[in-house]
Every structure is written in C-alpha cells, then in structure tokens.
Image: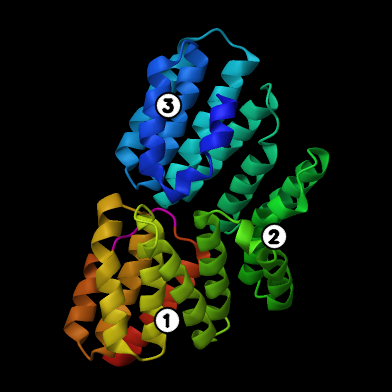
C-alpha cells in the first residue's frame, strides 16, 4: 500500500478523478484486508478533493466499521489514524471546526499507538490548523512547533517543511504581527515550485488574506487573482476556486467596486450552500449584507440579515468582519 501511496499522492490534488479510478482498481486486486481499507480511506481523500463529501463519509464509515470489528493491533491503530485524519479534513472543509479538532486529536493519539510514525508531523500540522481556526492561537503555535520537532526527528528535509512555515505565518497574521508573518511566508515561498497545487493555493490565498487584514487591497487582489488562476487550471479544485472567488468578492467590496464584488459573490454562492460549509456561508451572508448596503438597498440588507445562518461556532475573524458590517448597517438605518 505504501508504495502505491507514494506513487499516487502527487496526483491527489492535481487529478483526484484519476486517483479514484486507479485506487478502485487496486482495491479490486487487494488480498490483504487492512491494505484494502487503507485504499478505501485514500479513495475518501480523493472524493474530498472532488468536493464529494457524502461519498467521502461513506468510505470512511466503511473503513471504521472494519476497524471496530478487527483485533486491536498497531496496524489497526494506523488505519484508525488515517480515518480520523480524513474525518478531520472533511470537517474542516465543512467549517465544523470543533469537530475537526476532536478528529485530529484522535488521529494523533492513534498514530502514537501505531507502527508508522512518519506522518506525525502531518497530523500535528492539521491539528495546529484546526486550533488556529477555533481562535486558540497559542495551541496552534504549539502544534506547529511540535510539527517542526517531528520534522527534525524524522529528518524531513527543509524543502518539505513549508506547511509549517505558512501555518506559523497564519498565526502571526491572526495576532497582527505582520513582520513575523511575512518572515514565515518568505520561508514558505522559497519552496513554492515544490508545492502541490492545493498547497500553492493555501499559500497564495492565505498570503492574500494577510494583505487584506492590513487593508492593502491591491496586494491582496494580486495574490487572490493568482490563486484563482491556479484553481481554475485544475478542474477538480472546485472548493479552492469558489473560496478565492469569495475573497475576491469582499476585496472588491472594500474597494467600492460593487459590480465586481457582486459578480464574484454570485459565482461562489450556490457551491457553498450545496456543501453546507457553515463558516463560508456565514462569511458569504456577511458580504451579501454589506453588498446590499453599498447598493443603497436597505430592505434587501434587512432581509439578508433575517435570513443569515447562525452557526454554533464562528471564527473570531468572521465575527469581527460581521460586526464591522453590522455597525455600517445600523448607522445607515439610524439605530
């Protein structure tokens, strides 16, 4: 299985449909049951990259049923780790931040009890990302540092450490320490040509966000446009494409280019409603309220406020942006 994984991994974000076809073929000839379910989890990952979340969940459920009925062993713990790591990724894609933390923590614990510790740095990065999304920046930074420690002990080369660097850049962006933020983005940028497409998207999109939070909208636009061009060059990068469209929409909104803002927000709306990503929908509703205000349509702004979703958890940055636009709304209505 690991030989196949090493062979196919680079294709996951570039061509997940191809990975689905090849992995299904591998499953049909697998003679070892543990290997078969590892292939199934890999299939779930390909489904996630295709934004087919229901298929991803069904695959993970089947793999977990197998683990629950198997004799406990280090190999089964490795498979559990893969399953919970994937569950965490799917939760993150759907904006279920607290659930993603729980899943990644389980993945880490199972990996410690497994036979393959080579992925500990990857799960540490995922856990760090999840803590940052929940606003626990101290825990996020701790897990990024722990990931670097695992990179040292596992002798991971410098050219593969960039996910830690752009993760730490994100922490410093949240803390508005843009000097440290830029330092870590520059470290990550040195390896840009070695990044997979989805990793390039993370770098470009998040670096664009760092300029957004500085109110440097021209530079933010530059990175978001590069991100959109990248995503549109890979047919299965649907999630990344629409996420970037939403960021472009708000950036144009803040630059008072209302028609461009409306265009990009309209492009991404149906997709995020179809996958029920709560964080994205909260963010989108926020932009649509402000868009109505910019269009001098108070009744539409009021309607969108009444229909806006209210998720159980909202990321701190999203809450801050919503409050800023709500202030604008109440100023307009004289309340």
* Secondary element at image label 1: helix
Counting labels gives 3
Q: State the CA–CA distance, disc 1 to disc 3.
A: 40 Å
In the displayed orientation, state which residue is furthest to the top. 71
Report if residue 311 lies within the magenta region: yes
Determine whether, in the image, residue 118 is placed left or right of residue 62.
right
Q: Position of residue 246 (x, y in %)?
A: 37, 70
Q: Position of residue 4 (x, y in %)?
A: 54, 29
Q: Position of residue 170 (x, y in %)?
A: 62, 64
Between disc 1 and disc 3, the foreground one is: 3
In the rendered image, the vertical position of residue 155 relative to residue 335, given as above or below: above
How packed is label 2: few (under 14 Cα within 10 Å), some, or many (20 or more)?
many
Image quadrant in which you'd find residue 306: bottom left
Determine whether, in the image, residue 15 is placed left or right of residue 167.
left
Start-end of magenta stretch: 309-313
Q: Quadrant of the C terminus?
A: bottom left
* Secondary element at image label 2: helix
Residue highlighted by disc 1: 251
Q: Earlier in the sequence, mark 1 or mark 3?
A: 3
The reply to whether residue 134 is in sight is no
In the rendered image, the vertical position of residue 172 relative to residue 162, given as above or below: below
How packed is label 1: few (under 14 Cα within 10 Å), some, or many (20 or more)?
many
Between disc 2 and disc 1, the foreground one is: 2
């Amino acid at each position: 299985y690991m030989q196949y994984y090493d062979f196919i991994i680079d294709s996951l974000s570039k061509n997940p449909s191809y990975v689905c076809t090849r992995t299904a073929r591998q499953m049909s000839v697998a003679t070892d049951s543990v290997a078969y379910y590892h292939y199934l989890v890999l299939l779930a990952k390909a489904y996630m990259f295709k934004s087919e979340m229901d298929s991803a969940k069904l695959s993970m459920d089947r793999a977990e049923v197998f683990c629950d009925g198997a004799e406990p062993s280090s190999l089964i713990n490795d498979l559990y780790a893969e399953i919970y790591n994937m569950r965490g990724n799917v939760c993150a894609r759907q904006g279920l931040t607290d659930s993603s933390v729980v899943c990644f923590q389980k993945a880490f614990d199972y990996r410690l009890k497994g036979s393959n510790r080579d992925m500990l740095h990857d799960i540490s990065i995922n856990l760090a990302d999840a803590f940052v999304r929940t606003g626990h920046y101290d825990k996020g930074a701790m897990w990024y540092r722990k990931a670097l420690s695992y990179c040292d002990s596992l002798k991971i080369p410098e050219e593969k450490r960039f996910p830690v660097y752009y993760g730490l850049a994100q922490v410093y962006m949240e803390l508005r320490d843009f000097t440290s933020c830029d330092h870590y983005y520059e470290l990550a940028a040195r390896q840009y040509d070695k990044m997979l497409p989805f990793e390039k998207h993370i770098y470009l999109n998040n670096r664009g966000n760092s300029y957004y939070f500085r109110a440097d909208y021209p530079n933010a636009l530059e990175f978001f446009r590069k991100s959109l061009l990248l995503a549109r060059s890979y047919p299965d990068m649907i999630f990344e494409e629409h996420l970037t469209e939403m960021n472009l929409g708000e950036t144009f909104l803040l630059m008072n280019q209302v028609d461009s803002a409306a265009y990009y927000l309209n492009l991404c709306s149906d997709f995020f409603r179809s996958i029920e990503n709560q964080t994205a929908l909260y963010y989108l509703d926020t932009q649509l309220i402000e868009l109505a205000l910019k269009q001098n349509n108070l009744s539409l702004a009021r309607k969108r406020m009444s229909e806006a979703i209210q998720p159980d958890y909202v990321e701190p940055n999203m809450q801050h942006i919503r409050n800023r636009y709500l202030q604008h709304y109440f100023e307009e209505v004289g309340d």
